[in-house]
Image: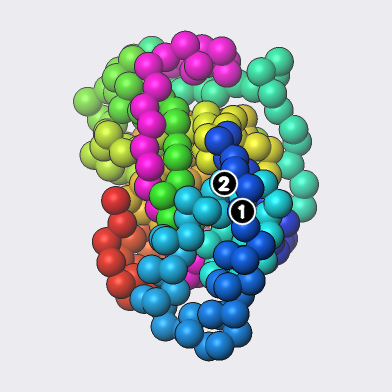
Amino acid sequence: MSRGGDDVNADDANAHEDGAPVGRRIVLGVAALGAAGIVTGRTVQDHLARWLAPIQNADPTGLTGLLPLGATFRYYSVTGSVPTKDASDYTLEIGGLVDHPTTLTLADLQQMPQTTLVRDFQCVTGWRVPEVHWTGVRLADLLETAGPTPEAKAISFGSFDGAYTESLTLEQALRSDVLVALQMLGKPVTHDHGGPVRMYVAPMYGYKSTKWLSSIEVTDQVVPGYWETQGNYDVDGWIGESNGRDDEPVG
Ligand SMILES: Nc1nc2c(c(=O)[nH]1)N[C@H]1C(S)=C(S)[C@@H](COP(=O)(O)O)O[C@H]1N2
Ligand SMILES: [Mo]
């Protein structure tokens, strides 16, 4: 099991479709701030991260990702390796307590109405990436098509990594800021970020956003997910209510 803070994905957070060169001076200047110990408090750090987000997102060199701001994604997987899937073999099963169980391909999902959100992504361990672009299908739209039965109370997500699971109540799942995400950071979700399809649950900590999404099962009660049973995380993963580290609401 690996769940490190390995920064192997730092470059992803810095890649953006409308990339522009970033002056070495900005990089050095900000590095100097960090070295001078100005980047210390969580609030200062967060403000700097926010101010830097457009620069970091446009930085093709990944250099700013080396700055001590923590505003980049860390790669997380509870399994050692995860099979690669693409349009040729990806499927999403929607089943359980629904009138119309269905299996969708990537093309099916791409043909549905897409929603874009620009929101922070925050891991419960403390790192946060500000103003990330997410695009995908609203989970609510998929559920509406599937038709939950009267007994339906919750959702259980499965991953093709074969291990990770997560849950939401049906009410949470119907929020308009809960996406079955096809794009992240302005491009298709990469394998390391859980592509081709991952969840993005905007108002909750990152652990709710299941990567390598393979199934959505409607259940009659909340089934606690992987980190809720192995890591003591709250089943209700609302940002700001789990660890007291947040200094401002997100979104
Ligand atoms: N399948 C799967 N999904 C997962 C995880 C995981 O280990 N496996 N980790 C979660 C946690 S704790 C976080 S913070 C985010 C990290 O997303 P990233 O790897 O794109 O940075 O994915 C979430 N979804
Ligand atoms: Mo996390």
Describe the element under mark 2 as helix, strand or loop.
loop
* Residue closest to the eye, 116 or 21: 21
**Residue matched to label 2:** 58
Which numbered circle lies on residue 22? 1
Q: Height in image: 179 above or below 147?
A: below
Name the spot of residue 206 as percent of width and height, x first.
47, 54
Q: CA distance from mark 1 to mark 2?
A: 8 Å
Q: Residues within 10 Å of mark 1 (few under 14, many from 20)?
A: some
- Give, as a three-letter code, the residue at label 1: Val
Q: Tell me where the magenta segment starts and ends, as one range.
A: 101-128
User: What is the residue that sits farthest to the bottom in this orientation?
Assistant: 37
* Res 81 visible: yes
Residue 147: quadrant of the picture: top left
Q: Nearer the viewer, mark 1 or mark 2?
A: 1
- Give, as a three-letter code, the residue at label 2: Ala
Q: Are marks 1 and 2 in contact (CB under 8 Å)?
A: yes
Asked whether residue 103 is drawn in magenta, I would say yes
Name the spot of residue 227 as percent of width and height, x first.
51, 59
* Residue closest to the eye, 58 or 112: 58
